[in-house]
Image: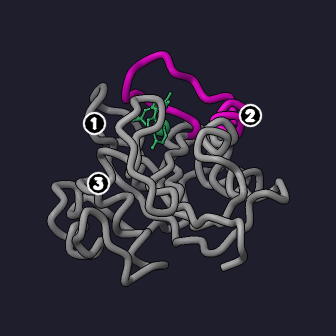
Amino acid sequence: MTTGYTKAVLALGSNLGERNDTLSEAVADLVDPPEVRLLAVSPVVQTKAVGGPAGQPDFLNMVITVETTLSPLKMLEHCQTVENKHHRVREVRWGPRTLDVDIIVYGELVSDDPVLTLPHPRAATRAFVLYPWSLIEPGATLNGERISVLATRAADFGDLAPFDGFGDFDGVPTAGAVEQP
Ligand code: ADP
Ligand code: MG
């Protein structure tokens, strides 16, 4: 770890459009500024959308770890700039979105500010965050518990599947991504 840099864990999700391409570009955008250095990238996992309107396409999710000299709020702003670049739509709460970037942890910082709550308040119950994170940081803990243990306990653990790489051609989610009638 270089002096002045803080390690942060970022979770990315997409369930609209060319989801896999969006995630790849978002990773590149997130680590583009010299203030953000990439440490590790998780595999992409596929999950059912949790909450929100029924019948929306499956999410692709992944986690990256970075080290950054950006302050927590500047990091949030940076994540939101990347979301906006990918034309994120926010019409429906928990509805489909082209890109969601959440800060899961920023160093050891604990904050209950609604603008930036750290650690992310729902991360400890989301297997789609905990499982890919555990693959790149097997020893990590959240709220004093190992993230791999929290992952298996999370209600959505059974809904996770490895992303097979199919289903994003022409921007139309197909294989495994659309409920069959
Ligand atoms: P969600 O990610 O929960 O589906 P949004 O992406 O729409 O919801 O985020 C709504 C707001 O959550 C953002 O405007 C942001 O200020 C706030 N927020 C609070 N804590 C965090 C965090 N740790 N990471 C990202 N956004 C956060
Ligand atoms: Mg978010």
Q: Please name the residue shown 68% across and 30% down the image.
A: 84
| Element carrying mark 3 | loop
Can you tell which of label 1 and label 3 is closer to the viewer?
Answer: 3
Tag count in the figure? Answer: 3
Quadrant in which residue 87 is drawn = top right
The numbered dot on residue 126 is 3
The residue that label 1 is drawn on is 181
In the foreground, 30 or 128: 30
Q: Earlier in the sequence, mark 2 or mark 3?
A: 2
Classify 10 Å Cα crowding around label 3: few (below 14), some (14-19), many (20 and above).
Answer: some
Furthest residue toward top:
91
Q: Measuring 60% from the left and 39% from the top, which residue is drawn there?
A: 73
| Label whose residue precedes the other's in the sequence (1 or 2) | 2
Residue 96 among those drawn in magenta: yes
Q: Which quadrant of the rendered structure holds the C terminus?
A: top left
* Residue 140 image offset from top left, x and y in percent: 37, 76
Examine the rendered structure and indicate whether residue 114 appears above or below residue 122. above
Hey, what amino acid is under mark 1?
Pro
Tell me which numbered mark, 1 or 3, is placed earlier along the sequence.
3
| Occupied quadrant, residue 150 | bottom left
The residue range painted magenta reads 80-99
Give the Cα separation between the discs numbered 1 and 3: 28 Å
- Give the Cα separation between the discs numbered 2 and 3: 26 Å
User: Helix or strand or loop: what does disc 1 sit on?
Assistant: loop
- Residue 168 rendering spot, x and y as whole percentages: 60, 50
The amino acid beneath tag 2 is: Lys
- Type of secondary structure dominating the magenta stretch: loop
Measured Cα–Cα span from mark 1 to mark 2: 34 Å
In the rendering, at what x and y percent does residue 82 appear? 70, 40
* Lateral position of residue 1 relative to residue 52, left or right: right
Picture layout, residue 95 above or below residue 92: below
Query: Residue 143 colored magenta?
Result: no
